[in-house]
Image: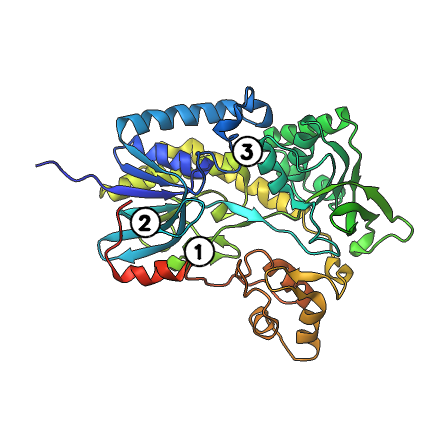
């Protein structure tokens, strides 16, 4: 009689999910890799659509050799039948059951039908998403997230516009600006609100990750080569346009985040790629009841959550880039393989990955402090500015709820204004609404990780279809 091999469901095929899949599969665990994209790679290794016939896709990517190794190893495991890759599956819920887990996912671009995947363990590698703080004009066509501009370039081989301003704060701005410039866009300016002195103060802590500093210096050199002006300690005050974006106004920031009078300058552009950092995707972890540390999923040294049988790795446990995601995914995959076989894992087997994890976590913790969004940004959001796009709630309505109606927390603001009740359920607007309201952006528990048709929910009383 053949012994049944345990199945691990890995949700997310970015760097963390791929590393975890390969580590677990190499140790005899059957892995079902579930991802919303048509191809593996996640945002970092996003590939051009096959129909575009890209001749040199590596030109748009960093660490291409690492991707090639991951792709080759994944192909080998797929051929061997050790890994099953389910693409175009949008996971909306993971159920805990007495004998394991059921992963529910909507199918394809229409997302009208749901399938179920059974597993003995679950590994969450759901990545992160961009934080964009509101400002006057941010809803104009032509204003996109920095990651969105990068995804359009990598996946569609298309520029979001011909003249671009890249603005906000965070390490994502550098590669986005250099990629747009290299692809032929005129990058009018890189507008970064962080103060360079923040990095000098943290030099001792940042120094151990010298490879990351060299990578950043490489991006800076490319900006210099393309003659892209870099405006540090600056912020976007307003985006202007009638039918679409036509220009943006930027200004210098002084002590305490106050504007420096007389530094306002209007820059003509048809695209504004803006980002204020990244936030972990924790919706599936929320639904499972996993504990959080701040905005990130809490894990132990094996990348286990506090829910038995559930691991997490990559940006969902804290924003830290591809290298950290690979290290965490490798550790999580090895731990899951051992635990699902009923053995105790040997941490010495992943010692190099653990050392990299420690070093990179310390580095990105300091980097996060250096790249904090500009202080007093909420004061510059006018009352007419829409802060919740789904429900078209303005900053003035949020301020009225706080100042006149007595709302003292984000949930009450939501109930009084409908901010966060729309399609995204506050996932995108929550930081902006919280900043304008002066409330803490406490993570909300959501049973479902994405909008689900009522017909799908009603059909759950019937036996679910197979994967």
183 to the left or right of 107? right
- Find residue 449 and name its label: 1
Please give the name of the residue rendered at 67% of the width and 39% of the height, measured from the top-left corner: 173
Q: Is residue 51 above or below residue 398?
A: above
Q: Nearer the viewer, residue 47 or 308?
A: 47
Please give the name of the residue rendered at 35% of the width and 58% of the height, measured from the top-left corner: 456
Q: Earlier in the sequence, mark 2 or mark 1?
A: 2
**Given the current orientation, which residue lies at the most extreme left position?**
1
Mark 1 secondary-structure assignment: loop
Q: Nearer the viewer, residue 299 or 78?
A: 78
Tag 2 near tag 1, CB within 8 Å: no
Mark 2 secondary-structure assignment: strand
- Find residue 115 and name its label: 2
Q: CA distance from mark 3 to mark 2?
A: 26 Å
76 to the left or right of 38? left
Q: CA distance from mark 3 to mark 1?
A: 24 Å
Q: CA distance from mark 2 to mark 1?
A: 15 Å
216 to the left or right of 224? left
**Given the current orientation, which residue lies at the most extreme top position?**
55
Mark 3 secondary-structure assignment: helix
Tag 3 near tag 1, CB within 8 Å: no
Horizontal and vertical percent position of residue 422: 55, 63
Q: Which colour scheme appears in the figure?
A: rainbow
Horizontal and vertical percent position of residue 390: 59, 60
Horizontal and vertical percent position of residue 365: 59, 45
Q: Quadrant of residue 187?
A: top right
Single out the mark in the foreground, 3 or 1: 3
Q: Nearer the viewer, residue 416 or 358?
A: 416
Residue pointed to by mark 3: 155
Q: Earlier in the sequence, mark 3 or mark 1?
A: 3
């Amino acid at each position: 009689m053949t012994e049944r091999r345990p199945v691990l469901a890995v949700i997310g095929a970015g760097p963390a999910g791929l590393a975890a899949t390969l580590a677990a599969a190499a140790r005899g665990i059957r892995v079902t890799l579930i991802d919303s994209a048509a191809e593996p790679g996640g945002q970092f290794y996003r590939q051009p659509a096959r129909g575009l016939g890209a001749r040199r896709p590596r030109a748009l990517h960093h660490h291409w050799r690492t991707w090639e190794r991951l792709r080759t190893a994944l192909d080998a495991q797929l051929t061997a039948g050790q890994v099953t890759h389910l693409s175009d599956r949008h996971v909306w819920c993971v159920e805990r059951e007495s004998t394991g887990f059921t992963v529910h996912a909507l199918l394809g671009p229409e997302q009208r039908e749901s399938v179920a995947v059974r597993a003995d363990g679950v590994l969450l590698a759901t990545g992160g998403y961009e934080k964009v703080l509101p400002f006057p004009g941010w809803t104009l066509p032509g204003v996109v997230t920095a990651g969105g501009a990068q995804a359009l370039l990598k996946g569609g081989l298309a520029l979001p516009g011909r003249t671009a301003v890249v603005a906000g704060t965070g390490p994502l701005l550098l590669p986005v600006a250099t990629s747009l410039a290299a692809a032929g866009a005129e990058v009018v300016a890189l507008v970064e609100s962080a103060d360079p002195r923040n990095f000098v103060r943290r030099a001792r802590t940042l120094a151990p990750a010298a490879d990351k500093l060299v990578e950043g210096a490489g991006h800076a050199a490319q900006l210099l080569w393309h003659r892209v002006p870099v405006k540090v300690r600056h912020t976007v005050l307003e985006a202007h346009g009638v039918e679409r974006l036509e220009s943006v106004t930027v200004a210098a920031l002084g002590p305490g985040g106050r504007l420096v009078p007389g530094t306002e300058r209007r820059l003509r552009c048809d695209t504004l790629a803006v980002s204020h950092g990244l936030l972990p995707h924790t919706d599936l972890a929320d639904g499972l009841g996993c504990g959080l540390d701040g905005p990130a999923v809490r894990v132990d040294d094996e990348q286990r959550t506090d829910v038995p049988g559930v691991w997490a790795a990559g940006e969902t446990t804290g924003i830290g880039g591809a290298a950290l995601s690979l290290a965490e995914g490798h550790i999580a995959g090895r731990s899951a393989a051992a635990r699902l076989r009923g053995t105790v894992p040997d941490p010495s087997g992943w010692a190099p990955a653990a050392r990299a994890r420690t070093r990179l976590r310390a580095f990105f913790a300091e980097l996060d402090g250096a790249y904090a969004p500009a202080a007093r940004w909420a004061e510059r959001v006018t009352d007419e500015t829409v802060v919740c796009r789904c429900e078209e709630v303005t900053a003035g309505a949020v301020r009225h709820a706080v100042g006149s109606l007595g709302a003292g927390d984000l949930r009450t603001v939501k109930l009084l204004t409908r901010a966060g009740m729309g399609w995204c359920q506050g996932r995108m607007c929550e930081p902006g609404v919280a900043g304008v309201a002066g409330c803490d952006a406490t993570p909300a528990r959501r049973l479902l990780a994405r909008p689900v048709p009522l017909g799908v929910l009603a059909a759950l009383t019937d036996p679910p279809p197979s994967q």
